[in-house]
Image (cartoon, rainbow, N blue to C red):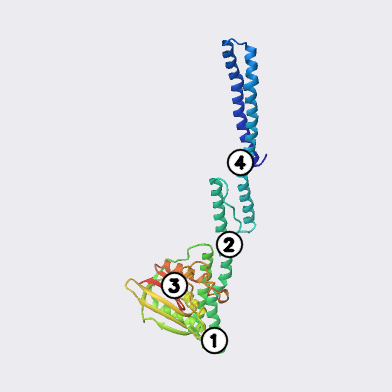
Amino acid sequence: MRGLAGRIALAAIATAGIGMAILVIGVVIVGGDAFSALMVEAGDSADHARAMYDQSVTQVVVGAAVVALAAALLIAVVLARMLARPLAEVGAAARRVAEGDYAARVPREGPEELRSVADSFNQMAIALADQERMRRDFIANAAHELRTPLTNLQGYLEALRDGVIEGDAATYESLREEVDRLVRLSRSLDALADGQDVRGLDQVDLDLAAHIRSALALAMPTLERAGLDLEVDVPDHLAARANPDHLAQVLANLLSNAARYTPRGGRVTVRAERRPADVLVSVLNTGDGIPADDLPRVFERFYRVEKSRDRAHGGAGIGLAIVKQLVEGAGGRVGAESTEGWTRFWFSLPA
C-alpha cells in the first residue's frame, strides 16, 4: 500500500465508498421516510410500511453497495497496476542506463501520458548512447588527427638523419612552424571536445597560392614515402581572405587525408582557381571511392566511412569536421565528390 499502485487503489476505493455511503444513506433513511409517509396516507400502518421497505429496497441497496465496492476494489487494483507497471519499467531502464547500458529501452504502453514518458526516455537513452559513442570515437581519433603534423616532423627528421636534406635555417624554421601547428591543433581538439567554437575572427587578406605551396612542401616527405605522384594546378598568385593558421590546418588535413587513402603509385592533384565571388581549392586523389550513402556525412564530427576506409587506415573522424568548421568560420563552403576510382574534396574562401 506504500507504492503508487496501492495509493491509487486506496483512493479509488475511498471515492467509491464515500459515493455508495451517500447513496445508501439517501435511499435507506430519506427514501424510507418518504415511502412510509406515502404508505400511511394510503391507509397502511407505519410499522408495516417500514418493514416492507427494509425487506425490499434496503436489502437490495445494501447488497448493491457491497457488490459495487468489491467491483471498485477490483477495478482500482487493475488500473493501479496498469499505471504503475510502465513507471516501474522506466525506473528499471533508468537504472540500467545509469550502469552504462545505453541500449535500455521502454515499451510504449498504457495511456498517452505514459507513452509520452516512454518516448522521452527512449530519446534520452539514444542521445546518451550517441554521446558515449562520440566520446569513444574522440579518444580513438584524437591520436589519428595529431598524427598528421607528427608524421611531417618524422619525415623531416629522418631526412636530416639520412642526409637527404641539409639542416639549414629554412629547414629548422619549417620544423618549428610544424611544432607550433601541432600545439594549435591540440588546442583546437580540446575546444572541439568541449563543444566550443574553434572558428577565428582574425581573418586577413593573404596569398592563397603561397599558402598552398607551403602546405605542399610540408606534405612532400609523406607523399614521397607513400610513392604518390603529385600534380599541382595553382596560379602564381591567388588573393583570398582567411585566418593563416586555420588555412594551414585545413590544407594539411586535406593533403594528409588524400595521402592516407591513395594506394601506392596513385596520384594526388591540387587545384586552385578564382571564381567571380570566391576562390576554389580542390584536392583529388585516386583510389577507392566513398560510398554514396556515406558521402553526405564525411564532414560530420567523428564519422568514419567504414565500408571503404577502415580503421586500419586511421579513419577520418576529426580532421574533416575541423576543416568544415574552419572553412565555414571564414565564410566559405566545403564539399566532397566521389566515384569509382577517385575522390575530390573542395573548399571555397571569400576572394
In the picture as drawn, the residue positioned furthest to the bottom comes out as 163
Query: Could you tell whether 147 is left or right of 73 in the image?
Result: left
Under mark 1, the amino acid is Ala
Query: Could you tell whether 75 is left or right of 256 in the image?
Result: right
Under mark 4, the amino acid is Leu
Mark 2 or mark 3, which is nearer the start of the sequence?
A: 2
Mark 1 or mark 2, which is nearer the start of the sequence?
A: 2
**Front residue of 236 and 104:** 104
Look at the numbered discs 3 and 1 and tell me whether their residues touch, using CB distance below 8 Å.
no
Under mark 3, the amino acid is Ala
> Which residue is identified by label 3?
336
**Front residue of 114 and 203:** 114
User: Mark 4 and mark 3: span between their CA atoms?
Assistant: 57 Å
> Which residue is identified by label 4?
79
> Which residue is identified by label 2?
132
Look at the numbered discs 4 and 1 and tell me whether their residues touch, using CB distance below 8 Å.
no
Under mark 2, the amino acid is Glu
Q: What element carries label 1?
A: helix
Residue 105: give x, y in percent of width and height: 59, 55
> Which residue is identified by label 1?
159
Query: Could you tell whether 144 is left or right of 247 in the image?
Result: right
Mark 1 or mark 3, which is nearer the start of the sequence?
A: 1
Mark 3 or mark 4, which is nearer the start of the sequence?
A: 4
Please determine whether, in this image, residue 4 is positioned above or below residue 336.
above
Look at the numbered discs 3 and 2 and tell me whether their residues touch, using CB distance below 8 Å.
no
